[in-house]
Amino acid sequence: MQQRNDLLIEQQVQQNMNINPTIASISIPDDKPLSPISVVKPQQNIHIYNKDYEGKILMLKRLANYQEQDYPNGTFYGQMMNGKKHGQGLMLLQGRVCEGIWQNDRKHGHCKEIFDTGETFEGEYQNGKPQGKGVYIRNNESYDGQWVNGFKHGHGIWKMGNDFYEGEWKFGKIDGYGVYIQNNNKYTGSFRNNLKHGHGIENFANGDLYNGQFCNGKPEGQGTYIWNNGAEYRGMFKNGVRHGKGVWSKWDPLKEGHYRYEGMFENDKKHGQGVFTWPSGNYYIGAFVNDYRHGYGEMFWKDQYYKGYWERGMQHGDGELCKNGVIKKGRFENNVLTNHRSNSMWESGESNFKLAANLNQTFSHGMSGSSQRNRYMPAIGRKPKLIMRKGDKTIILDNLIINDIPIENDPDFLTICPEPVQQKKFKPKMNCSQLLKQHFSTLRK
């Protein structure tokens, strides 16, 4: 009965080889007996023969301890010891072929494997797994380098299409120092867990360059980015964008100067306190929000300045504009002064007029200016009494030098009285600007 079964198997193998002379494999279904009185048990060993390896099998037959052994998934031709593959041999399996050295039933030494899918591996094995130097090829992908326990580990070269990596690996992942090229972008530096991590230099296909720290594949930490148009940023990055303190600059060949910003960034935009300088020399110091001048800031031109509040890049809010020495204060809207407020003594602390030059306007009502001037001029330089009136509110200043007093050109606001009667006296103990600011602010309300 056994001889009859073997004969039937050989006949089926021969028929299969006639159809496909390159490789033949056979599997026997569990539910289909070879004869009415013989049933093949599950996982029946099969015999596989590959005509392309006839010469190799003939050579193996000359070796000592040569045997042929069938397994559930293929046939082994080669040296065996105590029923185990041991020595040189050839293993024909369903879907692949392995040729090399075995030890104690495992691949151990130099081996070459070929898969029906087109994959190949040739290199060193230890205890059945790639260990040492080996080359793996699959379709348009290849790896040539070191292996440990079946993983890419150590130095190796990986290629896939136009992508290329040469460097260190750890247990199947890019880890350590290496060079990676993808879509003509080149990165040279440190990796961790398949991602750029640590210090590295990335040259982009469009001409841009980044040199600095990476974290989990993105620029993070201190770095320098140079654009192909000549712009440059040096500073902090986070999650791949400018974030933190940094300096951005760009050379303008037409204006022969630099655009430059030094300050804070957030999510790749100017955000926080900073200084922006134009090629002309104009500059802005103050707050930024989402790339706009926003909040309090001071803008300086060659012949003027603005100090005040901004909104989305425009003067908006309370501010002070000075042009050719003339100062205007008030509220601005969209770069236009809409509510003008002249300089007041407690706001600027600067004199617009001297009292001696203002007497004609002050005392021209009701009598001649000359008589008034003669009556009160001796007070200049001495210690007269000064009354500040606004409505029903009055405060007396005493022991002040008139030439030191900043006053407005407002005859209804300032009056000099030689004989103030029944007025509360106040002797200041601070400088004039501080005193006026502290005690007369209510008169303006």
Image (spheres, rainbow, N blue to C red):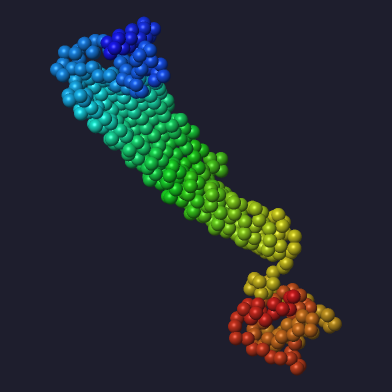
How many labels were placed on the picture?
0
Q: In the drawing, does residue 429 fall left or right of residue 226? A: right
- Classify residue 245 as left or right of residue 310: left
- Name the image quarter holding the N terminus: top left
* Residue 240 image point, x, y percent: 48, 45
Quadrant (top left, top right, bottom left, bottom right) of the C terminus: bottom right
Q: Position of residue 227 (x, y in %)?
A: 49, 40
Question: Between 272 and 99, which is closer to the camera in this rendering?
Answer: 99
Q: Classify 302 as above or below 429.
A: above
Q: Residue furthest bottom?
A: 422
Q: Residue at x 64, y 60 (%)?
A: 309
Residue drawn at 36 percent across, 7 percent down: 15
- In this view, the residue in front, 276 or 305, is 276
Residue 370 screen position, x and y as percent: 79, 82
Q: Is residue 413 left or right of residue 428?
A: right
**Which x, y percent locates residue 180?**
39, 34
Q: Residue 5 occupies which quadrant of the picture?
A: top left
Residue 196 in sight in this render: yes
In the image, residue 174 above or below residue 53: below
Residue 407 quadrant: bottom right
Quarter of image, res 97: top left
**For this rendering, which residue is in front, 138 or 415?**
138
Return the residue found at the far right: 366
User: In this view, which residue lies farthest toward the left?
Assistant: 64
